[in-house]
Amino acid sequence: MVLPAAGRCRTSILWRTFWLPLLASLLMWRLFCEACNNITFNVPHKLKAGMFIGKVNMKRCSNHSGIISSNNPNFTVLEDGSLYTTNALFLSSPGNTITLFFNPINEKEPKKIHVNLLTNPKKARKDMARHARETVRSRSKRRWLPVPTIIMENSLGPFPMQIQQLSSDMALKYNIRYSISGPGVDKPPLNYFYIEADTGNLFVTCPIDREEYPEFQLICYAMTSDGYTPEVPLVHTIKIEDDNDNAPVFDHDVYIFHIPENSKIGTVVGQVTATDNDEPHTLHTKVKYKIVNRNLQIYQNSHIFVIHPDTGCITVASSHLDRETTAEYELEIEARDMGGQDFGLCSKAIVLIEVGDVNDNAPQLGQTV
């Protein structure tokens, strides 16, 4: 059936004035919801604690403000939608999803926001460049955090002992409460540190062995009593200062070396090695070697063997190595830290040097009667 011209005109007007705007609104609403519910960020495989991942545009989800949270304890999200890591992570799979829950004011049902993390290092670098202003902003927030804290290993206390105070400039505007998390707090080893929520005073509760825990990285939070976070969660490093509590240890209690008799001066006999578990590249691990019982290996006021103080390499120092005179030498070797100073810690080992025979004696004819 063909409509009259007047009918076609009314239909066209109805389409333009009612149906077309309605369809456009429905399409925009769908795109609006998809933009809110599914977000993708490109990230590297290795994520540092306190790293800025990206910012969720909350205005795409609702015109109202509200409370937003993450279902993953490894991530935290601020009120403005900024997403950060709370722990150091390694993402082995190419795709990882975080669910954020947004509860706008005056809306009954919370909204779910699915954040997809795609491990794409090249695109991640571009995204980080695009978020440069956010990075600068987050760095400016770091002014509320003090420099790394240093604790002496095996401190005698008394415990609990205050080691630092966290202070936020936002305390001038808000009633700020402080909290911490991470290894040493709510992850093994548990309860090594705690913070006073109202003062920001940070305490250590017990002595700490540096060889077991050389460093802690605590995630620090500053928020209001109603959960608002005006500061970016930051990582605070606590370094355990080394105490010289470990003596060098030889890799063998007894070393056995062999050397031919009549070996030339400078011939290498062997090498001893001792390791120290204190902090590397300090005096606590600077080991010096020496021969202790020199009086047992002297021939005509000359040392038979010498040891290099830094390498532990033993060499021949005399031309009088004669198996027929002495077939074996026993040396006592000392390894001492603190650069060999008298107050350094030391350990000892035994070195047995067996002198091998060479054909250096001509046969003698017996006398005939």
Image: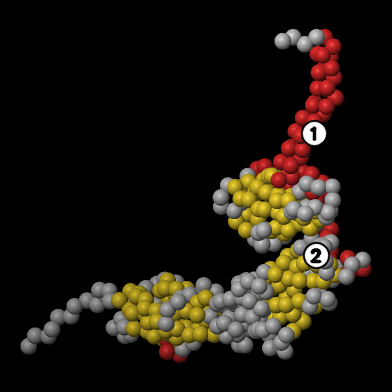
Give whichever of 328, 178 is nearer the camera.
178
Give whichever of 96, 136 is nearer the camera.
96
Q: Does 134 sit above or below residue 250?
A: above
The residue that appears at 69% across and 62% down in the rendered structure is: 86
* Figure quadrant of residue 343: bottom right
Q: Can residue 249 be seen in this view?
A: yes
> In x, y percent, where is residue 205?
69, 83
Q: How far apart are marks 2 and 1 (CA)?
A: 35 Å
> In x, y percent, where is residue 346?
54, 85
Q: Looking at the image, is mark 2 or mark 1 nearer the viewer? A: 1
Crowd band around label 2 with a 10 angstrom C-alpha radius: few (<14), some (14–19), many (20+):
some
Horizontal side of 237 relative to 228 (left or right) equals left
Give whichever of 83, 203 is nearer the camera.
83
> In x, y percent, where is residue 212?
58, 76
Q: Mark 1 points at which residue?
A: 25
Q: Name the residue under label 2.
A: 227
Q: Where is the N terminus found, in terms of image quarters?
A: top right
* Amino acid type shown at disc 2: Gly
Horizontal side of 321 relative to 142 (left or right) equals left
* Figure quadrant of residue 331: bottom left
Q: Does 14 sit above or below residue 266?
A: above
Horizontal side of 211 relative to 367 (left or right) equals right
* Amino acid type shown at disc 1: Ser
Q: Which secondary structure, mark 1?
A: helix
